[in-house]
Image (cartoon, helix red, strand yellow):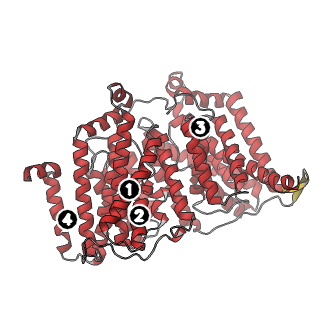
Amino acid sequence: MRASLNRVLGWRASIVFAALALLPFMPGMTRYYLLLAFDALLFGAVAMSLDLLMGYTGLVSFGHAAFFGLGAYATAILLERGVLSLWLCLGFALVVVGVYATLVAYFATTRRGIYFALLTLVFAEVVFTFFRYTQTFGGSDGIQGLPAPVLWPGMPLDTPLRNYYLVVAYLGSAWMLCRVLVGSHFGKVLVAIRENEDRARFLGYNVQRYKMAVCVISALLTGLGGAIYPGRAAYATPDLMLWTVSGEFIIMVMIGGLGTLVGPVIGGAFFILLQEKVSSYVDWYFMVIGGVLVLIVLFMPRGLFGFRHALRARPWRAPA
Amino acid sequence: MDYVVGVLLPQLLHGLVFGAALGLVALGLTVIFGLLGVMNFAHGELYMLGAYAGIVVIGVTQSFWVALVVAPLLVGAVGALTEVVTLRPLYRREPLYGLILTFGLALVFREGVRQVWGGDMRRILPPVTGSTPLLGMTYPNYRLFLLAASSVLLFGIWLFFTKTRAGILVRAAVQDAEMLDGLGVNVPRVFTLTFAGSAALAALAGLLLAPIFTIYPQMGVELILLAFIVVILGGMGSMGGSVVAAFVIGVTQSLLTLWMNPQRVAIAIFGIMILVLIVRPRGFFGREGVLE
């Protein structure tokens, strides 16, 4: 058992997770830093889910904010109606995000490259417009003032510490799932699709089915991240689904390094910390973040961590 | 009959006016896509910069007409600089890097403008006032001017691409940049000038629409999605297709607002795009097999 767990988790990751588990006991870990750590790890895990799509399959999704937001709304809707069980919230989020993601994936995966990016963007924009402009779920204010979800009777997730451990558990499960996927035959086929989709097809793989599967998996992981967000923030607003948020997810993956899994986690955490720190000094942090993104694309296309795999440089050809 | 003249006709004209300006934006977008393979996420910000450059020039010279010439030139220079510094190193890389890079540029431009001019809504007064009786109704002069100016411009661009050597070089670069390079043409310069031109067009559209709409740092974000839809509908890389699709979207949007609230219209437009992509992925005039 220990041996197999070690294989799935990896020994370096085990050390990191042990450190993360001990982090709240560090001196100086105030409520503020716990919440910051929550955000950093949450968005790190979301970026990692997106990396399955971007880094391994070569599909850039500009619609991940919709998966995240739908997950958040799923939880928020249940909490608002008095269903406090975290497990029910997560299950509901999985169903909602799963149905929507299957629909998006079915249409989007028939296209590649920029069409895929734009199709996911447009689908996400439909969802955003619905939540933002109809009053069914609170319109532009979203759903506010939510109670804390309950892990089991008598165990509400109402302190930053409990929420922190929840997000560590989420990151851990997502990490193990991604690692197993990437190491499996399925993961190898994804990389084959990224490198040469036509060749993968000629080898007899049903490419679209693989792309759909990885889209849905990535969306579900992102949706789960969204589903635990209202527990920390006590709200779900349509701004979580803005297409620029999808862009921020992409920035996180790029900062960390495409196709490395670890990289995007670091990238997501780095992005959140940078945003928090920079925005506490100046109010033009988006300029800093945009500038960082530009510099990374120009000078460090493999990101902070991506030294092994990356989209390869191709000889110059007319793109159209 | 009263309904046609009083409601339908003005709305149709509104659609044409907006479609013509949208065409200017989409045209630049599609040419850049054809050349560099990059869907320029910063294009909406160039459109926004056009309006702000207009405010500055009008502030200095008190003349909308001077601004109409100077502002696009300024933004074109910004575009050329951007292309040389940031996009040129990416020529040999995967186009997706360009997409991500322009997203970062968009953030920088948008936030930069907010820092310099603040986030408030601003207006430019129309330089032409009054309205003209037309087909039994009256229609604002400025909108008529906008429609005429955009149409003349679009026609001029068509002439440029078909009759002049420079225009033919650009089209050749879209088709096969490597061959053009082999023929001894300075291809990077073609790219830079084209990018500058498309930036100037977007800026011009921004300034032309400014007296009708309001000016604020987010205005590009609102427009760029629509411009993307236009480019996809018209067929990626097809210039004529973009212009036709811009008019189609402009008129459709304008007519739909008669019967639906604006949010439903937005969803309907997205729906149209998704339908077209499923039924005819290459768009109205896209070449077969391109990125399908």
Where does the image place residue B202, in percent across and percent down from the top left?
Answer: 63, 48
Discs 3, 1 touching: Cβ within 8 Å: no
Q: CA distance from mark 4 to mark 1?
A: 30 Å
Which residue in the structure is indicated by mark 3?
Answer: B31
Q: Categorize mark 3 by other alpha carbons within 10 Å: few (<14), some (14-19), many (20+).
A: many
Viewer-closest of B85 and B171? B171
Which residue in the structure is indicated by mark 2?
Answer: A74
Q: Give residue A122's mark.
A: none
- Residue sitting at x 66%, y 41%: B245
Q: Judge whether B231 appears above or below B125 on screen.
A: above
Provide the chain ID for the residue under circle 3: B
Discs 2, 1 touching: Cβ within 8 Å: yes
Q: Say which element carries label 3.
A: helix
Front label number (2 vs 1): 1
Q: CA distance from mark 2 to mark 4?
A: 28 Å
Decide if residue B194 is in sight here: no
Decide if residue A21 is in sight here: yes
Which residue in the structure is indicated by mark 4?
Answer: A20
Q: Judge whether A68 appears above or below B180 on screen.
A: below
**Residue type, mark 3 in image:** Val
Front label number (2 vs 4): 2
